[in-house]
Image: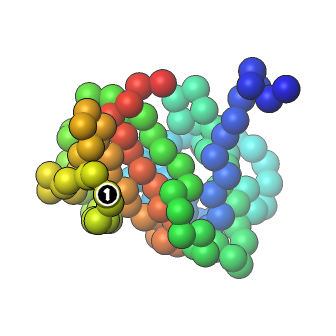
């Protein structure tokens, strides 16, 4: 039923303009121009990331969105770090860490937070 339908990330934020600075200025996403006072929709590859304003923002303790960056993961992590992004370090079973990148076999991943504490992730996968 839904397997052939597009899916998009929906991320709660407390301050839309602060979120705009992060998602556009730091992550480089492009506003697609949806007119709504509490929502910003961004293009990210062939996907959409919806950012919406709510008082419960930042309460999720799990990953909100993942970007598949393929072999560019080290470069992407370095560029995000240069823009002031701090990376999360987790003790995960079966994973080691090389600086800010967690490694398990051939999988590499790095987690970081937006200004509201929402957990975001980049992986060396290609979709």
Q: On the picture, is 101 further left or further right than 122?
A: left
Q: Is residue 127 visible?
A: yes
Left of 34 or right of it: where is 23? left
Among the 4 quarters of the image, the one containing residue 123 = top left
Residue 60 location in percent, x, y?
59, 69
- Judging depth in this view, the residue of 85 and 122 nearest the camera is 122
> Hey, which quadrant is residue 16 in on the image?
bottom right
Q: Tell which residue pokes out farthest to the front in this image.
A: 94
Q: Nearer the viewer, residue 61 or 28?
A: 61
Instruction: Tell me which residue sits at (43%, 64%) in the image.
Output: 113
- Seen as rendered, the residue at the extreme right is 1
Q: Residue at x 26, y 28 (%)?
A: 71
Q: Which structural element holds mark 1?
A: loop
Q: Which residue is mark 1?
A: 93
Q: Is residue 102 left or right of residue 23?
A: left
| Image quadrant in which you'd find residue 1 | top right
Total number of numbered labels? 1
Q: Report the residue at 58% width, 26% height from top.
A: 46
Q: Position of residue 75 (x, y in %)?
A: 21, 39
In the image as oriented, which residue stretches furthest toward the left? 98
Question: Residue 70, position in %: x, y?
Answer: 33, 29
Q: In the image, is residue 39 above or below residue 108?
A: below
Q: Residue at x 49, y 71 (%)?
A: 117
How many other residues sit within 10 Å of disc 1, few (<14), some (14-19) or many (≥20)?
A: few
């Amino acid at each position: 039923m839904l397997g052939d339908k597009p899916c998009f990330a929906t991320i709660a934020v407390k301050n839309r303009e602060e979120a705009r600075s992060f998602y556009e200025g730091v992550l480089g996403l492009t506003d697609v121009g949806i007119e709504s006072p509490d929502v910003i929709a961004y293009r990210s590859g062939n996907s959409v990331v919806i950012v919406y304003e709510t008082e419960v923002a930042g309460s999720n303790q799990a990953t909100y969105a993942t970007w598949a960056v393929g072999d560019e993961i080290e470069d992407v992590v370095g560029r995000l770090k240069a823009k002031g992004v701090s990376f999360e370090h987790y003790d995960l079973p079966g994973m080691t860490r090389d600086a800010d990148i967690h490694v398990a076999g051939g999988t590499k991943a790095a987690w970081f937070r937006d200004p509201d504490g929402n957990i975001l992730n980049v992986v060396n996968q290609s979709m």
